[in-house]
């Protein structure tokens, strides 16, 4: 079965990152839930998924994810392999850095997901984040506000890391 990416983006940063990931992994099934929140219902049709969000407010999920969150919580993720991506700003929000990733991770594992694609915190500088497990980020973390020069390399490394499990 094909792999799909579901994402939402307020100012376009996550969208840009998702487009690059899709290109690297040759994934053509992309669903922007900022355009159509109903698309969330299609998650059940895939057993391999990449979910991407940015972080807003005080470590919150991006607004469109937030709006469908009650529905999202009902999705059964058992037998699904999931890789997570989050965008944040480690300088401006160093005590809630990519907390949206932590929120998404906790929810999908509660619903039975096999989450892959953890990454090192080397090269990031922040005080606190809920997106950590055993000192690793529970997905790919991108900071377009402070480290956009590292984005392509981070995407390259991460897509190579997950390729065999997600495609
Ligand atoms: C008002 C506001 C609140 C934010 N809150 C957080 C936050 O709590 N933690 C974090 O890591 N990033 C935070 N960010 C940074 C965004 O997640 C970041 O700019 C991201 O690249 C936006 O992606 P998008 O355009 O796809 O929505 C915030 C940005 C703004 C403008």
Image (cartoon, rainbow, N blue to C red):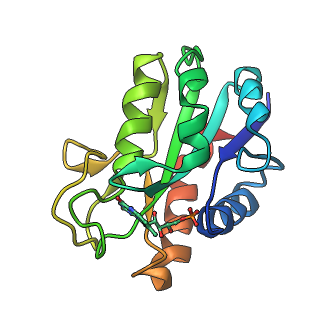
- Residue in front for this viewpoint, 163 or 8: 8
35 on left or right of 124: right
Position of residue 95 measured from the top left corner of the image (x, y, whole percent):
21, 60
Vertically, is 135 above or below 153?
Answer: above
Q: How many marks?
A: 0
Image quadrant assignment for residue 107 = top left
Position of residue 121 measured from the top left corner of the image (x, y, whole percent):
27, 61
- Report if residue 118 is visible in the image: no
Position of residue 6 measured from the top left corner of the image (x, y, whole percent):
68, 43
Position of residue 49 measured from the top left corner of the image (x, y, whole percent):
64, 36
Ligand 1's quadrant? bottom left
30 on left or right of 107: right
- Locate the C terminus and report the quarter of the image it occupies: top right
Vertically, is 123 above or below 8?
Answer: below
Vertically, is 34 above or below 123?
Answer: above
Furthest residue in direction left, as rendered: 127
What residue is shown at x 21% (from left), y 67% (from top)?
126
What residue is shown at x 65% (from left), y 32% (from top)?
48
- Locate the N terminus and report the quarter of the image it occupies: top right
Furthest residue in direction bottom, as rendered: 149
- Report if residue 140 is visible in the image: yes
Vertically, is 11 above or below 75?
Answer: below
- Residue in front for this viewpoint, 150 or 68: 68
What residue is shown at x 44% (from left), y 37% (from top)?
104
What residue is shown at x 26% (from left), y 68% (from top)?
122
């Amino acid at each position: 079965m094909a792999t799909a990416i579901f994402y939402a983006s307020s100012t376009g940063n996550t969208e840009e990152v998702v487009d690059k990931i899709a290109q690297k992994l040759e994934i053509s099934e992309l669903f922007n839930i900022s355009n159509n929140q109903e698309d969330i219902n299609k998650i059940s049709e895939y057993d391999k998924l990449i979910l991407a969000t940015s972080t807003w407010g005080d470590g919150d999920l991006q607004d469109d994810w937030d709006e469908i969150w009650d529905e999202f919580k009902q999705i059964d993720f058992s037998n699904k392999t999931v890789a997570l991506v989050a965008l944040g700003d480690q300088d401006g929000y160093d005590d809630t850095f990519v907390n949206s990733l932590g929120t998404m991770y906790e929810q999908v594992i509660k619903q039975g997901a096999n989450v892959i694609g953890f990454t090192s915190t080397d090269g990031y500088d922040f005080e606190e984040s809920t997106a950590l497990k055993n000192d690793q980020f529970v997905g790919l973390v991108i900071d377009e506000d402070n480290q956009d020069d590292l984005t392509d390399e981070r995407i390259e490394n991460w897509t190579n890391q997950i390729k065999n499990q997600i495609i």
